[in-house]
Image: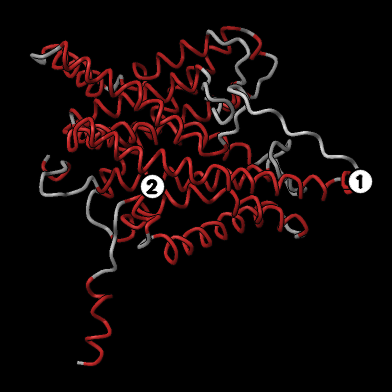
């Protein structure tokens, strides 16, 4: 298993870097697709919207952020072991809290601007009406935008990391942690992980009669107190990732299980979409519980299956995947304004959704990656997000070699 382990000499978990970056890049596809859904449910609603986009949104939304928080927990424990509690806190303030504070207002301003433009385009008479007053900023209405994931990470760090320290103090001999590791290993090796890890979320969903089933885990992008479903789902994923890092040799188990997990994920996703589409039956508690079970199992089989597949296919140094991992944070921070502007500009294009959606996705990725390469990668912003990077030695030596 040494080829899967990060060593003290500075090797990386290449596969997990890649899948974490991929999860963030999927956010571009998710948000770009919202303009082309039918019925409309977004800031910019394109007339070419089609119900065929719904299953794409449903599938990506099912697992994407749970997968992200699973890996966030894995790398959080790695960082904690490397730097200790104080070093961990300083690093997270720099790389998570600072970007949240820096980018929140510009992103919110861009969203409001495009929302006004889209509303005026749809109904020009609004230009002659007084604008409604902005809602007051309260604990319950604070707009976190798509940067809510940074806020959620900070909450998880603030609660779970001190609890880890308290547990280490109480369990000074390590017996409790060894017992917990034994249970965790047994669950993962037995193939029961999707059921066990998904049980807390399934139980919480049953306690929420107003749950909007099609949205799965409700996005906690409004308010400073996240909804209980999001807290349960993402905290469970984060803790599972932390425990996986404690038992990193179990990546080999995920490697062996990846195919059955992905086949199961596809089956559960299809089942959830079929069950959720039967609106009349969803009023019944048993039917709703069955749907929630399919959804939660799909969430976890996707997360574990994609992680295992990455270990199978991507666990080696790769310039491409390293660049994806490095750039994904910046791309996700800035992509939403690009997506909204492009969706707005494409409103007048007479083309079907399957033309406009790829245009919006690839144009957003191009602009985001271009700004990363030219403005961020080797700048102080890049140093905040990913640590200091320098151009390769080959690039720095090119002028000298050319004159030699």
Find disc 2 in the rendering and name its residue.
Answer: 21
Query: Which quadrant of the structure image shows residue 176?
Result: top left
Measure the alpha-carbon separation of dots 2 and 1: 45 Å
Q: Is residue 343 left or right of residue 133?
A: left
Q: Above or below — where is 91 with respect to 390?
A: above
The answer to which of 197 and 274 lies nearer the viewer is 197
Question: Residue shown at 63%/13% (left/top)?
Answer: 210
Q: Which residue is farthest left?
A: 173
* Category of crowding for the residue at label 1, using alpha-carbon neighbours closer than 10 angstroms: few (below 14), some (14–19), many (at least 20): few
Quadrant that contains the C terminus: bottom left
Residue 135 at what x, y percent from top left? 71, 29
First along the sequence among labels 2 and 1? 2
Quadrant that contains the N terminus: top left
Q: Above or below — where is 383 with respect to 403?
A: above
- Please tell me the numbered disc located at residue 128: 1
Residue 34 at what x, y percent from top left? 64, 42
Residue 194 at what x, y percent from top left? 36, 22
Question: Residue shown at 79%/44% (left/top)?
Answer: 119
The colour scheme used here is: secondary structure
- Please tell me the numbered disc located at residue 50: none
* Category of crowding for the residue at label 2, using alpha-carbon neighbours closer than 10 angstroms: few (below 14), some (14–19), many (at least 20): many
Question: Residue shown at 35%/38% (left/top)?
Answer: 93
Numbered circles on residues, count: 2
Q: Which residue is farthest bottom?
A: 403
Question: Residue shown at 57%/60% (left/top)?
Answer: 363
Query: Which quadrant of the structure image shows residue 99?
Result: top left
Q: Are marks 2 and 1 in contact (CB under 8 Å)?
A: no
Q: For the residue labelled by badge 1, is the local secondary structure a helix, a strand or a loop?
A: helix
Q: For the residue labelled by badge 2, is the local secondary structure a helix, a strand or a loop?
A: helix
Q: Above or below — where is 156 with respect to 6?
A: above
* In this rendering, the label closer to the viewer, 2 or 1: 1
Residue 83 at what x, y percent from top left? 19, 37
């Amino acid at each position: 298993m040494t080829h899967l382990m990060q060593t003290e000499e500075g090797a990386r978990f290449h596969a997990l870097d890649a899948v974490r970056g991929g999860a963030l890049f999927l956010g571009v596809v998710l948000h770009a697709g919202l303009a082309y859904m039918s019925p409309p449910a977004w800031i910019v609603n394109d007339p070419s919207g089609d119900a065929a986009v719904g299953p794409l949104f449903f599938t990506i939304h099912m697992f994407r952020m749970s997968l992200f928080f699973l890996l966030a927990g894995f790398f959080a424990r790695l960082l904690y072991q490397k730097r200790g509690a104080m070093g961990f806190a300083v690093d997270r303030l720099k790389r998570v809290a600072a970007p949240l504070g820096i980018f929140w207002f510009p992103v919110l301003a861009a969203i409001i601007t495009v929302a006004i433009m889209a509303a005026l385009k749809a109904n020009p008479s609004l230009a002659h009406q007084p604008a409604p007053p902005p809602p007051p900023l309260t604990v319950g209405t604070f707009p976190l935008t798509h940067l809510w994931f940074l806020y959620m990470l900070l909450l998880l760090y603030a609660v779970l990391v001190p609890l880890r320290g308290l547990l280490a103090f109480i369990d000074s001999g390590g017996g409790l942690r060894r017992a917990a590791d034994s249970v965790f290993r047994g669950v993962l090796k037995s193939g029961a992980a999707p059921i066990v890890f998904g049980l807390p979320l399934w139980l919480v969903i049953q306690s929420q009669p107003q749950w909007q089933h099609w949205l799965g885990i409700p996005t906690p992008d409004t308010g400073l107190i996240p909804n209980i479903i999001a807290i349960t789902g993402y905290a469970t994923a984060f803790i599972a990732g932390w425990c996986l890092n404690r038992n990193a040799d179990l990546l080999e188990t995920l490697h062996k299980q990846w195919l059955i997990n992905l086949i199961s994920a596809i089956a559960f996703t299809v089942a959830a979409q079929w069950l959720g589409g039967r609106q009349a039956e969803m009023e019944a508690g048993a039917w709703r519980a069955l749907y929630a079970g399919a959804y939660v199992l799909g969430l976890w089989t996707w997360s574990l299956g994609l992680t295992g597949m990455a270990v199978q296919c991507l666990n080696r140094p790769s310039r491409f995947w390293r660049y994806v991992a490095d750039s994904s944070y910046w791309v996700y921070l800035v992509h939403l304004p690009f997506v909204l502007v492009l969706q707005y500009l494409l409103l007048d294009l007479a083309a079907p959704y399957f033309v406009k959606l790829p245009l919006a996705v690839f144009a957003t990725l191009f602009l985001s990656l271009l700004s990363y390469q030219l403005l961020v990668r080797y700048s102080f912003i890049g140093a905040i997000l990913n640590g200091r990077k320098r151009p390769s030695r080959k690039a720095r030596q090119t002028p000298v070699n050319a004159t030699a």
